[in-house]
Image (spheres, rainbow, N blue to C red):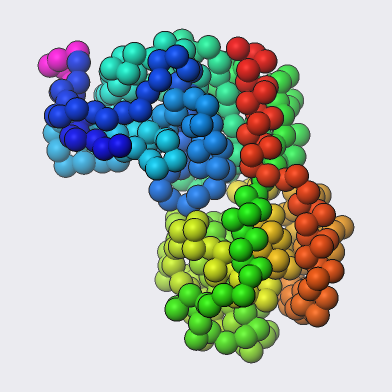
Amino acid sequence: MSWAGPFQQDIGKSPHPQVDGEAAVVFDPLIPTLLCLSHLRWSFVYQRPQHLMSRFAREYNLLFFEEPVPTDETTPWLEVRPDEEGVQVLVPRLPEGLGASARRETLRGLLDDYLARLGVEDLLLWYYTPMSLAFTDHLQPSLVIYDCMDELSAFRGAPPELVERERELLARADLVFTGGYSIWEAKRRLHDNAHAFPSSVDIGHFASAREEQDDPADQAAIGRPRLGFYGVIDERFDVALLEQVAALRPDWQLVMIGPVVKIDPATLPRPSNIHYLGGRTYDELPRYLGGWDVALMPFALNESTRFISPTKTPEYLAGGCPVVSTPIADVVRSYGDSGLVLIAATAEEFVAACERALALGAERETFLAEADRVLGDMSWDLTQARMKEMIECLR
């Protein structure tokens, strides 16, 4: 599947887009089209939206509409990128300097023209960001789904109108999913058809970390014991805790994998036993995880982490790695009594918990059997199937 040219429209000149070449879009008019409106980019970090949308793409025409990217061109256009998992990734490219009204109308025009070009008749809307209501509130979908995976208004840089936009979305939504139990408890008071779907896991993908394999080249030279984290390093990450743990146990090697976002990389601690390896693809993660003795979740306790339900918790366990986490509410609730995820609040407690986690290596077979029992049927396939059943019951 290929896209031969940009999907372009001169706003104010022609009501229809100008297309260079033929758009090779796989589209079946006999099945519904699911339009997902996301604040996260498809190619950033593989997480909940990618897991779910790649599975829904097996049953629906799947369009994944990202937030706009500024361009120095004067003509706005819509980049359409076919994904190997059957998802059409739509990236609006907007001239810099557009005011709020012009931006809204431009996005509306690009999206409307693309839906018209495809001949979409049966449309479902799936929101990850309420801010997308600004240019989609005129659409007439058969169903509106809000998958509230995070409390976005608590994140650094959140637009001030986000709370009001979410109220509007909750009033329009037919169905609300949440990324964990804590956030479900908050949203169910605002919507009478809200359902908690905590983080799931692709067990087969991460179970490969349990197998004997060579370390990735950039990790192979790092000594042991080796304690690791992968994920976005942002305001949810407890930088001070990481620095204190590194200082308390200079013989431990702390491996940090992931992009640094919304915080200054210069503020990260740089002792010799902390190793920042940068971002890695979803396919690469099991190899790194397989080389760790303990997996870490050093999240700060603040407004941005109050409702999170980290996807990496079951991924670490599927990979056969004991976990040490700060007391995130959903982690404590789901795993605190398991003996597989140890909870610690202070640096001293975190070090002690890591020492206990390291000792679990001596009982590996027992640990793996218990991890498999806890994970049970916690799969993205089952989560998506349950969501699909709820959607179809309302259509």
Does residue 92 lie above or below 206 as drawn?
A: above
Q: Quadrant of residue 229?
A: bottom right
Residue at the (45%, 21%) spot, across then down: 33
Looking at the image, residue 213 sits to the left or right of residue 306; the answer is left
- Decide: is 213 above or below 155: below
Work out whether residue 127 can be spotted: no
Count of numbered circles in the view: 0
- Answer whether residue 2 is visible to the viewer in this image: yes
Q: Position of residue 49 (x, y in %)?
A: 53, 40
Q: Is residue 139 above or below residue 43?
A: above
Q: Nearer the viewer, residue 26 or 361?
A: 26
Q: Would residue 13 be found to the left or right of residue 301 on screen?
A: left
Q: Magenta stretch: residue 155 in it? A: no
Where residue 274 sits, quadrant-wise, is bottom right
Q: Position of residue 10 (x, y in %)?
A: 15, 23
The front one of 361 and 96 is 361
Q: Is residue 185 left or right of residue 82?
A: right
Residue at 78% x, 57% y is: 372
Quarter placement of the N terminus: top left
Q: Quadrant of the C terminus?
A: top right
- In depth, the one of 107 and 217 nearer the eye is 217
Q: Main secondary structure of the magenta part?
A: loop
**Which residue is located at x 51 percent, y 82 percent?**
220
The magenta region covers: 11-15
Q: Position of residue 337 (x, y in %)?
A: 87, 57
Residue closest to the far bottom: 251
Image quadrant in which you'd find residue 61: top left
- Residue 251 in the image, given as x and y percentages of width and height: 64, 89
**Relative to the observer, which residue lies in front, 127 or 298?**
127
The residue positioned 68% from the left and 44% from the top of the image is 379
